[in-house]
Image (cartoon, rainbow, N blue to C red):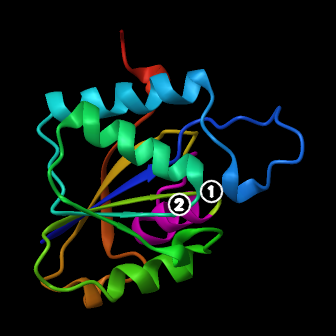
Amino acid sequence: MKTLLLLRHAKSEWSEAGVPDFSRTLNNRGEKAALAIGNYARKNLVRPDLILCSPAERARQTAALLIEAAGFTAELRFDERIYEASWSRLLDIVQQLDVAPATVLMVGHNPGMEDLLLNLTGVNRHMATAAFARIELNVESWAEAAPGGGRLDWLVKPKDLSD
């Protein structure tokens, strides 16, 4: 059994003129949301063995705040293939993982994250900014991950969490 955690980056800043998409930072609401999701992960004993993150600034900041609030100690790897990836590219990344980690957290972007959730589980749920999902895969190896092969355990959004 493998567990894939998906986290869409938190709300980013759009008001800074001339800032390339890749370099956009989180806004105040996004920072609070990332911390809230991190607190949720800590309280619910969510513990990834590996964290894969898009190198885009807003994803990096989301991961850093989540890790801090959740107290994660897993290795953090930045993977440029996650930025602007389609769901099929994200699935390729998952399938290429080493067998060892039982639980992997991927921090990325829409529409890829939402489409990956749909294609793995058959469940069509909106992944709002900072949405956090847990997918159970009944496989021994990440290479066996396939469309329709997962079950959505839960999906939580910052607005669902009480302060």
User: Nearest the camera: 153 or 102?
Assistant: 102
Disc 2 secondary structure class: helix
Amino acid type of the residue tagged 1 in the rendering: Asn
**Residue 99 visible in the snapshot:** yes
Query: What residue appears at the point 63 percent right and 28 percent down from the top-left corner?
Result: 27
- Helix or strand or loop: what does disc 1 sit on? loop
Is residue 99 one of those drawn in magenta?
Answer: no
Where on the picture, by quarter, is residue 2? Answer: bottom left
Give x and y (percent) for residue 147: 43, 79
Q: Position of residue 63 (x, y in %)?
A: 39, 47
**Residue 70 against residue 95 in the figure, above or below:** above
Q: Is residue 125 placed above or below 56 in the rendered structure?
A: above
Kind of residue indicated by mark 2: Met
The kind of secondary structure the magenta stretch mainly shows is helix
Q: Is residue 116 magenta?
A: yes
- Residue that protrudes farthest toward the top in the picture: 163
In which quadrant of the rendered image does the C terminus lie? Answer: top left
Residue in view at x 54 percent, y 54 percent: 124
**Which quarter of the figure is the N terminus placed in?**
bottom left
Span of residues in magenta: 112-126
User: How many tags in the picture?
Assistant: 2
Measured along the vertical axis of the image, is residue 108 above or below residue 47? below
Q: Which mark is residue 113?
A: 2
Write down the residue under mark 1.
110
Please report contact status of discs 2 and 1: CB closer than 8 Å, yes or no. Answer: yes
